[in-house]
Every structure is written in structure tokens, then in C-alpha cells.
Image (cartoon, rainbow, N blue to C red):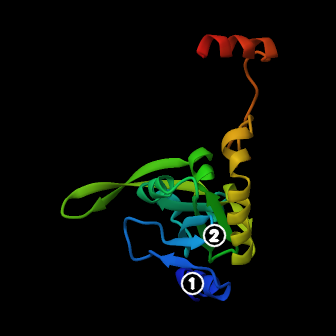
């Protein structure tokens, strides 16, 4: 099977999109693609190549097919390139591509753990266990590209206009709490804070 990075390069060339391949850098996201004259989107490319050890990662057999593990550092790089950044995961086991915007990365439920590693001395490496179903599943890289464009087109709504909790994520149940806010309260809030 062709590596995901090679697939992305072939896809972007076929679409005649200008892009930067930063996949050899440890400090940058793997790709920056020029979507049009105004917008560049930055993303990391990841692959799920094998099943995870259920005991080592404390996963159930039901959780494992949807599980993915990323470095905490990789997640922070995505945040550093925000708001026009994200991650695309190719699932080599079950098929499909999953797009996570920086907003999804920030808001979705996740389990953060430190994994013991051995370098010159024993150390820890931060990892995130995430649920692939919290990303937007796509059948092709064309669908992923469409989501990049949609994300940028709706960025003002996503970041500034939507009042309710953003996203519908696995493992999260958003309830309602507090008193109903009425317009007269907003007037008081404005007077007291301006």
C-alpha cells in the first residue's frame, strides 16, 4: 500500500494545488496547501496501520476499531498553526479518512496519558487516545479537500457566532444547566462590563 504522505502528494499534484511538503520536519505540520489566493490550510497526515494492544492501552475490543493514538506534541503543533489547521488520518484497517479540525482537537473528549519510553534515560512521552468517530469521515481525499474549504468558509460561525457547544462527539453528553438568560440580563452584563 502506498504511504499516506505519497498519496497526498499525488492527490495535490493531480489537483494542481500549490503545497509545501514539511513531512521531514519535526517542527512543522506535514503539509500546507494553498486552497485559493487567500487561504492556506496546514495539516498533519497520520495512518492507522495496525490494531492496538488492548491491555497496554486499556481498550476494550469494542473501542479499539475506533481508537487512534497521537502524540501530545503533534496535537500542540496543530494548535500552533490554528485556526487554519487540522489532522487527516487514513484508516488502513477499516478504510476511510478522518478529518479533525483544530477546533475538534481542542473540544473533543480525549484521554491524555504519559507513555514510558527509554532514551538515554527513562522518560515519558505524552499521548492522546482519541475516537476516530469524532472526526469527519470521508471516502476520498477529494472529500477531505472539500472539508478544508468548508471549514474555512464557515470559520466565522464556528469561532464567533455559534452560541451552543460546538460539535457532536462520541463519549460526551452535553446537558443543560443554569437559569434561562433573558434579554434584560444581557443589558445588565453590557452596562457592568463596558
Q: Nearer the viewer, residue 36 or 98?
A: 36
Under circle 1, the secondary element is: helix
Q: Is residue 112 above or below residue 4?
A: above
Residue linked to disc 1: 9
Q: Position of residue 33 (x, y in %)?
A: 58, 72
Q: Work out which quarter of the rendered image holds the N terminus and state it.
A: bottom right
Q: Position of residue 141 (x, y in %)?
A: 69, 77
Question: Residue visible at 73% across and 57% down?
Answer: 153
Asked if residue 155 lies left or right of residue 53, the reply is: right
Q: Nearer the viewer, residue 52 or 46?
A: 46
Question: Could you tell me how far apart the alpha carbons at marks 1 and 2 are, in whole angstroms?
Answer: 20 Å
Question: Residue visible at 60% across and 84% down?
Answer: 7
| Picture disc at residue 134 | none
Q: Position of residue 157 (x, y in %)?
A: 73, 45
Give the residue at the far left of this rendering: 120
Question: Residue visible at 71% across and 42% down?
Answer: 166
Q: Nearer the viewer, residue 116 or 188?
A: 188
Q: Position of residue 75 (x, y in %)?
A: 48, 56
The crowding category of the residue bearing disc 1, from other C-alpha atoms within 10 Å (few below 14, some 14 to 19, many at least 20), is some
Q: In this view of the protein, can residue 140 be seen by the observer?
A: no
Asked if residue 28 lies left or right of residue 119, the reply is: right
* Residue 136 in which image quadrant: bottom right
* Residue 152 in which image quadrant: bottom right
Residue linked to disc 2: 37
**Whether label 1 touches label 2, CB < 8 Å:** no
Of labels 1 and 2, the one closer to you: 2
Q: Is residue 52 above or below residue 16?
A: above
Asked if residue 157 lies left or right of residue 108, the reply is: right
Under circle 2, the secondary element is: loop
Q: Choose the circle earlier in sequence order: 1 or 2.
A: 1
Amino acid at each position: 500500500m502506498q504511504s499516506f504522505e505519497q498519496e497526498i502528494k499525488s492527490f495535490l499534484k493531480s489537483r494542481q494545488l500549490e503545497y509545501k511538503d514539511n513531512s521531514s520536519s519535526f517542527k512543522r505540520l506535514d503539509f500546507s496547501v494553498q486552497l485559493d489566493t487567500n487561504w492556506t490550510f496546514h495539516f498533519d497526515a497520520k495512518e492507522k496501520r495496525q490494531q492496538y494492544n488492548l491491555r497496554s492501552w486499556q481498550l476494550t475490543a469494542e473501542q479499539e476499531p475506533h481508537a487512534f493514538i497521537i502524540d501530545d506534541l503533534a496535537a500542540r503543533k496543530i494548535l500552533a498553526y490554528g485556526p487554519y489547521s487540522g489532522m487527516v488520518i487514513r484508516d488502513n484497517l477499516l478504510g476511510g479518512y478522518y478529518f479533525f479540525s483544530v477546533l475538534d482537537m481542542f473540544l473533543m473528549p480525549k484521554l491524555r496519558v504519559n507513555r514510558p519510553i527509554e532514551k538515554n534515560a527513562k522518560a515519558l512521552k505524552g499521548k492522546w487516545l482519541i475516537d476516530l468517530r469524532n472526526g469527519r469521515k470521508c471516502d476520498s481525499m477529494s472529500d477531505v479537500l472539500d472539508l478544508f474549504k468548508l471549514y474555512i468558509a464557515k470559520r466565522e460561525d464556528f469561532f464567533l457566532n455559534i452560541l451552543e457547544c460546538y460539535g457532536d462527539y462520541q463519549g460526551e453528553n452535553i446537558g443543560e444547566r443554569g437559569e434561562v438568560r433573558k434579554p434584560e440580563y444581557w443589558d445588565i452584563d453590557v452596562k457592568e462590563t463596558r
